[in-house]
Amino acid sequence: MITLGEIAAVAEASLRGCDAATIITGVAPLNGAGPGQISFLSNPRYRPFLAVTRATAVILSPDDAADCPVPAVVAANPHVAYARVAALFEPPPETRRGIHPTAWVSPAARIAADAWIGPHCTVEAGAVIESDVIVGPQCVIGEQAMVGAGTRLVARVTVCHRVRLGRRVLAHPGVVIGSDGFGLALDRGGRWLKVPQLGSVHIGDDVEIGANTTIDRGALEDTVIEDGVKMDNQIQVAHNVHIGAHSALAGCVGIAGSARIGRHCMLGGGVGVAGHLEITDYVQITGMSLVTKSITEPGAYSSGLAVEPNRLWNKISARLRRLDEAFRRLAVLEKQANRKSKTIILDRKKKTNGHQGNS
Amino acid sequence: MITLGEIAAVAEASLRGCDAATIITGVAPLNGAGPGQISFLSNPRYRPFLAVTRATAVILSPDDAADCPVPAVVAANPHVAYARVAALFEPPPETRRGIHPTAWVSPAARIAADAWIGPHCTVEAGAVIESDVIVGPQCVIGEQAMVGAGTRLVARVTVCHRVRLGRRVLAHPGVVIGSDGFGLALDRGGRWLKVPQLGSVHIGDDVEIGANTTIDRGALEDTVIEDGVKMDNQIQVAHNVHIGAHSALAGCVGIAGSARIGRHCMLGGGVGVAGHLEITDYVQITGMSLVTKSITEPGAYSSGLAVEPNRLWNKISARLRRLDEAFRRLAVLEKQANRKSKTIILDRKKKTNGHQGNS
Amino acid sequence: MITLGEIAAVAEASLRGCDAATIITGVAPLNGAGPGQISFLSNPRYRPFLAVTRATAVILSPDDAADCPVPAVVAANPHVAYARVAALFEPPPETRRGIHPTAWVSPAARIAADAWIGPHCTVEAGAVIESDVIVGPQCVIGEQAMVGAGTRLVARVTVCHRVRLGRRVLAHPGVVIGSDGFGLALDRGGRWLKVPQLGSVHIGDDVEIGANTTIDRGALEDTVIEDGVKMDNQIQVAHNVHIGAHSALAGCVGIAGSARIGRHCMLGGGVGVAGHLEITDYVQITGMSLVTKSITEPGAYSSGLAVEPNRLWNKISARLRRLDEAFRRLAVLEKQANRKSKTIILDRKKKTNGHQGNS
């Protein structure tokens, strides 16, 4: 039983044309909402749906409020306001506490009394699970790993030995934290010798880690993910990477060893970052771009190429192979043009002279 | 004991130069087959092996049949025919039924009597497992998830709460279906606020999902994979994506939020699709291409660049950085050329006039 | 208690300015090392830290030894020497032997007496686990799979039926070996028919496989990873791929079906290799490049483009779409230039003639 009045309070929003006592039963998109549901308008792409929405109320900006045909919940940042409101309608969190009978917990692990260790979990010796932690089914917590208060490992998360997770970390199924970094030395015979990976991983508070993302432990020092970093699915973070606070990484990003990403950065899907470089704060990289050198200025960077019909693309890529040649041909033409310009000028002079001579 | 006659019936093929009673004991490639084995020729790349094959019979097209040195099983589509024949030689499917003693199944889950729940599985309250389902070892089936009849989860598959799988779905190890979408709102302080992911995932019938592929649940409405879609390994499907029936996605594809892929599309390995766009039916995208805008016409599209020796590539990429400059230099030359053409024409006139004047 | 003398012996190094009895308690980077710790200098990027290191000793090359302000452990290849020394400080390996009570092992599996099967593992009928194997928590070993002596599956590794792993293989969490290849035949109705994947996977000795990497089984013959291959995290290896001995693949590489990679190759992060092609020995491919044709010459190859500021990149990519047009415009200019050169020459002749005529 949530009222519009309660919603306005949570959203730090004001009501326009609303009865604060109206009961809201759920959230829905503008074009799918029905009676009892609240919707929101943030992305201008969806504005056309506002006129026809059947939502009981809509969260939107002061600018859009005038066009709202139904009661309006007016917020400076409707997306943030919506996020807060939607949280009211989330399924109730795990309330189980204790250790599931099918879990295996080392007697030398320390588990807070109000934590939950789910079915078929493995918790090794020396691991510390703090207060209010939810370890979902089939997670592995390695030796001496630390899981901070309020953290939730949804399911099948692997936390390797000595890894430290902060508070309120959220890790989705299939995440691996603390696997060995890819450290190899090339022996005389062209064989690879494994370089022991003796560091660990330190994850800050309020970090979210998407499904099947992997974060390697450091070779000597730790791999570090600072507070508030948000990582999507299938991201690969190599050893000794450092990601600054409040950066967001979309799916399939790959970051090579010892790269440093600044704070408040945004990396698009599939971005690749080479090793041993530094990206400063407030940098945005668009999807499928490749970073091979340090970036010292905030701003947006790209190197992704968008598809064209094959017929055109085949021509472009064939031409691209001859790009160097084209520049050289261009230079030849420019030289000729300069010479000719001079020639023509000279010719004119000659002609003029000739004419003069003939006059 | 499978005979060529039975094989012809399954393959909807005709026999040429064969004794229908010949016994076939297995399948093998053209260049590796020996007595008792049947092979096939579909990809023209492998035609050279036909002349020297030691297979007991070969499945091939009417066009290739004339060159077949051994008994021929002639089919209009040899690849399809082979697929049917090979199925005869697959290892027998899981025949266990019931619940493995090491599995943990909530008393509030509903499991069909002829389903199999393998070792160390976790099945939460409200989950429904229909008839003839095989849940391999170490799968997690979340609360109120539904798994349709005949589906097989090979091993270590995570099906999150409320996800619905159709009939005869095949999900390989490490698959995650229904993890939270990457929904974030940027707060005043530059901090990310989680947007609750309240939708779910709906997977149609006859969908195949490759190892370690991840499919996120919708933010509000469901992520949808229609019937007959085939997905390879390590694909990332973001929240609210919609993939049309009978599309095929190769490994490492990444699809951003709310993108709609049409029916009968084919996406090559490593393709990236940006969010909030639409790809129409019957579109093919070649490997490692990036789609950033809607595609409204069927056909093949690309943006991948193929490797060159470093020496050449370094020149190309250096030149590419100066491509805009090159276009401007080209325009300058064209202007000069036009002016000169006029100049020359004018000069000629002058000269002509001059000559006339002098004549 | 490890002395510098013991370290020199392991590293095949000579001591300079050292007391061989000095005790070393650990390894650390040049700029983080303190008393009792040994460091190393291999990457010239870190040379500036040498002058200020507080390490008790440093492993370095003969060339760098002169500048070493602390006792020096001089080795021809300091990276290899360091790898050997660091191994002395690794955490002790798993010493448990036997089968954890929560594991489920088929009575028809064969487990060496000195192997370890960890918590919640599943080992199916016919599987063979050789001597000194460590199977970490929550692994799945399929029917008739073979795991060679000294192999370690860290945690949550899936080894499907009939897969064969060599000796001393190291597989990190989330690895899947032997999932079905992506084999599909297109039926008349535009529907995909599954092609049974009847081959398996054969992994050689001393292979390392990174977290969440997937290796599909062959369609007919085996997928093969030869001895000494090192694979990073989240690599996708399709069916019937063959990777030659001692090749190293960085994170997020994707290799399509039936591709053959040579020996001693190095593939950078995110590289894509198309199917049915061959890469010869000693080839290096830089990060995020795409290989679409066979490579027959050793050497380094690239096709990745590095980021530029958006403003510049948007111009470049817009221009790139018109690259074919630019080449045509260039050709027109060249034609005109040639014509004009002739025209000017002709004009000069005319003028000369004219002048002559006037003379």
Image (cartoon, coloured by chain):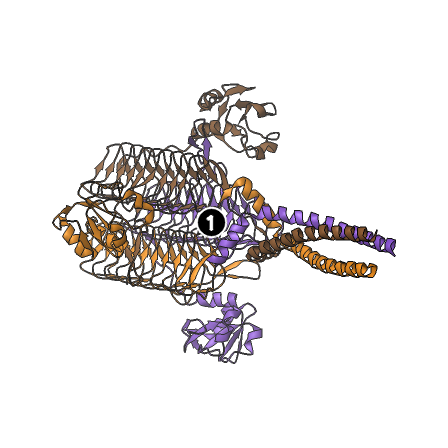
Chain colours: A purple, B orange, C brown
- Letter of the chain that mark 1 sits on in the rendering: A
Classify residue C211 by image quadrant: top left
Q: Position of residue A343 (x, y in %)?
A: 76, 50
Q: At which x and y percent is residue A225?
A: 50, 48
In this view, C18 is above or below B218: above
In the displayed structure, A350 sits above or below C135; it is: below
The image shows residue B295 at horizontal and vertical percentages of 46, 64
Q: Where residue B82 sits: x, y (%)? A: 24, 52
Classify residue C232 by image quadrant.
top left
Instruction: Mark 1: give few (<14), some (14-19) or many (20+) Cα within 10 Å.
Output: many
Residue B336 at least partly seen: yes
Q: Is residue C118 above or below residue C64?
A: below
Left or right: where A303 falls relative to C273: right
Q: Nearer the viewer, residue C287 or A38?
A: C287
Q: Is residue C25 visible from the viewing direction of this image?
A: no
Report which residue position mark 1 lands on. Answer: A166
Q: Residue furthest left?
A: B21
Residue pictured at 70% horizontal, 58% vertical? B341
